[in-house]
Image (tube, grey):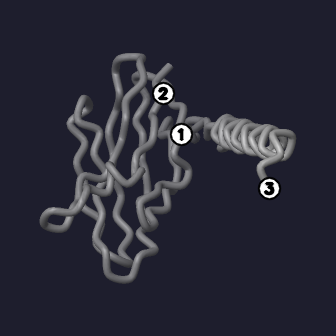
């Protein structure tokens, strides 16, 4: 069992496996999904529904036009855990109770990329944002 060829082959396979796992992980992040582009309706309002689940928003990437109102229907599919939807820079903060649906309206005036997130947490545990409940709003 002290054959150096076996040891080198084992190390080579281990390194290959690590590289393969890292590559698959990078590709899956890159292919996480296309952003959802919101088009103004006949009334000029850009609308979308966002599903709030355990530590995720779906969709989690939105593209909107500056100067046009945005209306987001936030639907929580969790049965116990409450969430919220915050875009600090746009003064948007909306609580969404477990199993509830609420609507949030705002008009982004400046182009840019704004993060939205849930900052709920239980005592000393990490916040929902720290667990990955975050998305991006791109204003063009």
Q: Which residue, as the protein is rendered here, is positioned at the far left? A: 123
In the rendered image, residue 83, in percent from the top left (x then y), is placed at: 30, 63
In the rendered image, residue 75, in percent from the top left (x then y), is placed at: 43, 66
Q: Is residue 43 above or below residue 74?
A: above
Which residue position is annotated with label 1?
A: 61
Q: Quadrant of the N terminus?
A: bottom right
In the rendered structure, the answer to whether residue 136 lies left or right of residue 129 reads right
Question: Does the image show residue 97?
Answer: yes
Which numbered marker is on residue 138?
2
Where disc 1 sits, the SS reads strand
Q: Is residue 140 above or below residue 20?
A: above
How far, Cα to Cα, is label 3 from label 2? 58 Å
**Residue at horizontal 45 percent and vertical 36 percent from the top:** 136
Where disc 2 sits, the SS reads strand
Where disc 3 sits, the SS reads loop
Q: Quadrant of residue 95?
A: bottom left
Which residue position is annotated with label 3?
A: 1
In the rendered structure, the answer to whether residue 41 lies left or right of residue 133 reads right
């Amino acid at each position: 069992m002290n054959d150096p060829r076996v040891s080198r082959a084992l190390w080579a396979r281990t390194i290959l496996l690590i590289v393969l796992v890292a590559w698959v992980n990078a590709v899956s992040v890159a292919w996480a999904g296309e952003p959802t582009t919101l088009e103004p309706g006949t009334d000029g309002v850009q609308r979308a529904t966002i599903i709030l689940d355990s530590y995720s928003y779906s969709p989690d990437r939105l593209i909107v036009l500056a100067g046009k109102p945005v209306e987001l229907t936030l639907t929580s599919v969790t049965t116990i855990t409450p969430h919220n939807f915050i875009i600090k820079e746009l003064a948007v903060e909306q609580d969404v109770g477990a199993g509830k649906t609420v609507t949030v309206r705002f008009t982004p005036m400046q182009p840019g990329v704004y993060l939205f997130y849930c900052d709920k947490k239980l005592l000393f545990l990490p916040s929902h944002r720290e667990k990955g409940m975050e998305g991006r709003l791109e204003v063009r």
